[in-house]
Image (spheres, grey):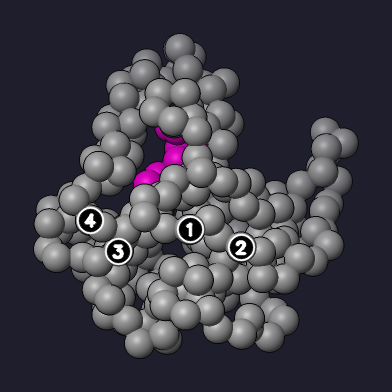
Amino acid sequence: MKILVACEFSGIVRDAFAAKGHDAWSCDLLDTMRPGNHIKGDVLGILDDGWDMMIAHPPCTFLGISGNQWMNHPRYPDREKDRENAIEFFMKLATAKIERIAIENPVGIMSTVWRKPDQYIQPYLFWDPETKKTGLWLKNLPLLVPEKIVKPIYIIGKDGKRYSPTHHLSKSSAKKLFGLDRSLVRSITYKGIADAMANQWGGRRHEPRPKGGGLQ
């Protein structure tokens, strides 16, 4: 299949499908982190290029509930417009004329302004002991089935709440460990989930990968 992975700079999902023999391409405004088929630019300009499947990761900065605290804040006077633009971009992906579509995003406003996701997944359902509740909006694709459930690992923040290690990184730690801004690290798809997508949506089911993974 000819597969588009929209808004991906890491190449993790792209490479998972490429490993199964598919003609997989990532597209993002950023360069790809690893060698592979990558289109640098606006994904909206290539939606009609004959794709069989699209897996999209629209930016969640203005869509996630975590950003609600900044709405109508005097420091961010354009926040409402930013959210409107983000919703419009999401919907252009969701309504693209591509036979099979999966759109992932964390818990956010798309559940109310459009519809609820078909399912929520967690990395710890797919080999990686992290927590990151993510919704999947699906078109002509089955629900993603857990491949290996592991016990999630938490750290306790200064506020006493539990956080996954990767997604509670400080700005300096994210830069030191991954060479990326913290927001970019948080946006990367876990390899266990990427492999499950390729296994289950890229043809016949394959044996799950060996233990290991994370942001690799």
Q: Quadrant of the C terminus?
A: bottom right
Looking at the image, which is closer to me, 126 or 59?
A: 126
Q: Amino acid at mark 1?
A: Pro
SS at badge 1 = loop
For the magenta stretch, what is the residue range?
57-64
193 relative position to 203: left or right = right
Q: Using the image, tell me which numbered label, if any, was put on residue 142.
A: 1
Q: Earlier in the sequence, mark 1 or mark 3?
A: 3
Occupied quadrant, residue 88? top left
- Look at the numbered discs 4 and 3 and tell me whether their residues touch, using CB distance below 8 Å: yes
Question: What residue does disc 2 label?
Answer: 145
Compared to residue 148, the image places residue 131 above or below, namely: above
How far is disc 4 from disc 1 in space, using C-alphas? 16 Å
Q: Amino acid at mark 4?
A: Ile
Which label lies toward us, 1 or 3? 1
Residue 82 spot, x, y in % from top left: 33, 27
Question: What residue does disc 3 label?
Answer: 53
Q: Earlier in the sequence, mark 4 or mark 2?
A: 4
How far is disc 4 from disc 2 in space, using C-alphas? 23 Å
Compared to residue 72, the image places residue 216 above or below, namely: below
User: At x 67% / y 70%, what residue is drawn?
Assistant: 147
User: At x 36% / y 55%, what residue is drawn?
Assistant: 140
104 relative position to 126: left or right = left
Residue 24 spot, x, y in % from top left: 30, 75
Question: What residue does disc 4 label?
Answer: 98
Q: Amino acid at mark 3?
A: Met
- Look at the numbered discs 2 and 1 and tell me whether their residues touch, using CB distance below 8 Å: yes
Looking at the magenta stretch, what is its main secondary structure? loop
SS at badge 2 = loop
Say if residue 73 shows up in the picture. Answer: yes
